[in-house]
Amino acid sequence: MEKTNESVEMPEMEMNFADALDEYLNSDFGDLDEGTIVSGEVVKVDKDYVLVDVNFKSEGQIPVSEFTEPDGTVAVKVGEKVDVFVARKNEAEGTIYLSRDKAKRMQLFDKLEELQEKDGEAVGRIIRRIKGGYTVDLGGVEAFLPGSHVDLRPVPDMDALVNQEFDFKILKINRRRSNVIVSRRVLLEEMRSEQRDKLLETLEEGQVVQGKVKNITEYGVFIDLGGLDGLLHITDMSWKRIKHPKEMVGLGDDLELKILNFDREGQKVSLGLKQLVPDPWENIAEKYPEGSRFTGVITNLADYGAFVELENGVEGLVHISEMSWTRKLRHPSQMVKVGEEVEVVVLGVDPEKKRISLGMKQISPNPWDVVAEKYPEGTVLEGAIKNITEFGVFIGIEEGIDGLIHVSDISWTKKIRHPSEVYKVGDSVQAKVLTVDKENEKFTLGVKQLTEDPWTQVPAKYPVGQKVNGVVTNITDFGLFVEVEEGIEGLVHVSEISRKKIKSPSEMFKEGDTIEAKVIHVSADERRLGLSIKQTKEEPARASGGKSKSFGGDSVSAGSTLGDLLREKLEEAAGDALAAAEEEEAAIAVEEAPVEEVVESEAPAEEAAAEEEETK
């Protein structure tokens, strides 16, 4: 009986075990889906792996690197609860693959999407520069920050933002591609708009405000007033002249400024820095009266002069012409340099234009006043030649003052083409003072004025009608130049060479020939001596014709009829008229002849004197 009862109870026990096993398996593994995040418990921390129990057939292995901090420590312990991502599971084999990093990324993406929906802000750190912008770490997810969304204005130094932490707006999220795009500019624009609205309600002209230097240009500085930018122009930075705003401010500087002009509608603000201190140009004429002496510092050099700072914000100009009495400066750097301290005299003050004219040479007496008193006109002095030019020589008179001996004042009679024919640098020369012009700073001397002009004696030595002997020095188409003594030449016009018409005087004469001629014209003022060869030959011819009779004051040969007499007078009148015409043509030819031709022909002193007189 007992055996029978035992056999009946066995099937009931086996049936309960199967139901219990099925219930156990269904309750443990029914909620683990791939691609989800589940909570698990750390059961073991190995050297390479961390085992996490997620109520599966077996524990999941996660690389220990996913729990390792930057300093190398493993930030997890046995028994600790962690969220993991179910990457893949195999129920047949009872294996499961987990990831803590993916779980954290999915949780972070969920948080970022929530922030994006709520228009919130995410904190991130710029970790490196890349093409087109930056990479930002949002606490485990790397996001892209475009360069145009870094700031409201272009950033001068892009590298300076690396490793800095900022708040960002999330523009776009692509979970599938793990892409996130953020912007800092959008956040700044929102903040700026709020600040601008508040600032516009309080700003007014004349108000003193605080601002930060945001950008520096050649013409001024842009100041961030907290929601609105204002312009500080270079002319409103300092009462003194500055070349560039960088001389006074740098990026990021905090400044106190005054609102000069405010356009509420256009949202434009003009700022001033110098207006916070008194204008040093007030009562400037009283502080710097004309004729007073001051000491200043050279601040800048220009082609036209030097700027001298008399006090902070007050500069005057020393024109290049007011630097030296005697030196002809090409540039102020020949006298002064920047930073040098100089003594100046106030020449003029213009308060309206804020200009002060200064002089340096006025510190010492004008040497031209001394020279004018020391060397009046007519004084004979001696000095060394400092320079020779084609128009004359310069003689050193006093320190910085030279006297000019013009080439025309070297000799009365000798024609000098270049002063170097007579002098050389360093020669000691005696000369007479001709003029001293203090206003134009000209000092002229003469050598020939030390002796009497030989032409003053010519009319007495060579009166009209006198016969002279001379040497032919030059032959031209209009006549011969004959030297009657050293430096004194006369002209025999072609019409006075012979009764016969000749084409060119060179047919009958050559240079160096000695001739006899008669003086027919002489003028010391015009420096001209007119000679005639034909008239020296007519007198012997008339004398050999026999006795003559007086008729109207002229000598007439014996036996001459009235017709002969009339014919002779007509011929003489015609000859004189022809001679006058030819002489006029010759004079015109001389005047119109090129300078080179006259120089090459070595025209004698008489022609040179005539040309000089015409020039005067």
Image: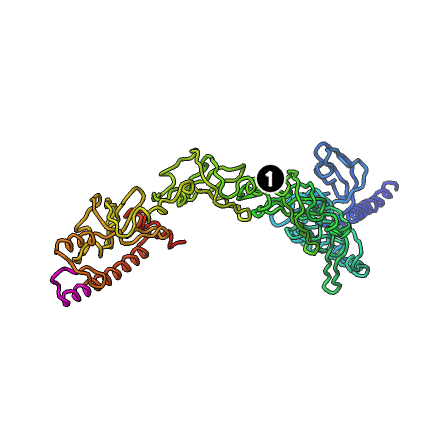
Q: Position of residue 418 (x, y in %)?
A: 37, 42
In the foreground, 171 or 279: 279
Above or below, 423 against 153 in this view is above
Based on the picture, tell me whether residue 566 belongs to the magenta stretch.
Answer: yes
What secondary structure is the magenta-colored segment mainly?
helix
In the foreground, 161 or 142: 161
Q: Position of residue 146 (x, y in %)?
A: 65, 52
Q: Secondary structure at mark 1?
A: loop
Q: Position of residue 482 (x, y in %)?
A: 25, 47
Q: Horizontally, is 27 left or right of 547 in the view?
A: right
Residue 568 visible within the image: yes
Above or below, 332 against 188 in this view is above
Residue 411 falls in which quadrant of the image? top left
Disc 1 designates what residue? 336
Quarter of the image with the N terminus in it: top right
Based on the picture, tell me whether residue 453 belongs to the magenta stretch.
Answer: no
Q: In the image, which residues are magenta?
A: 556-570
In the foreground, 203 or 113: 203
Q: Position of residue 231 (x, y in %)?
A: 70, 55
In the foreground, 327 or 576: 576
Residue at the location (22% across, 55% down)? 496
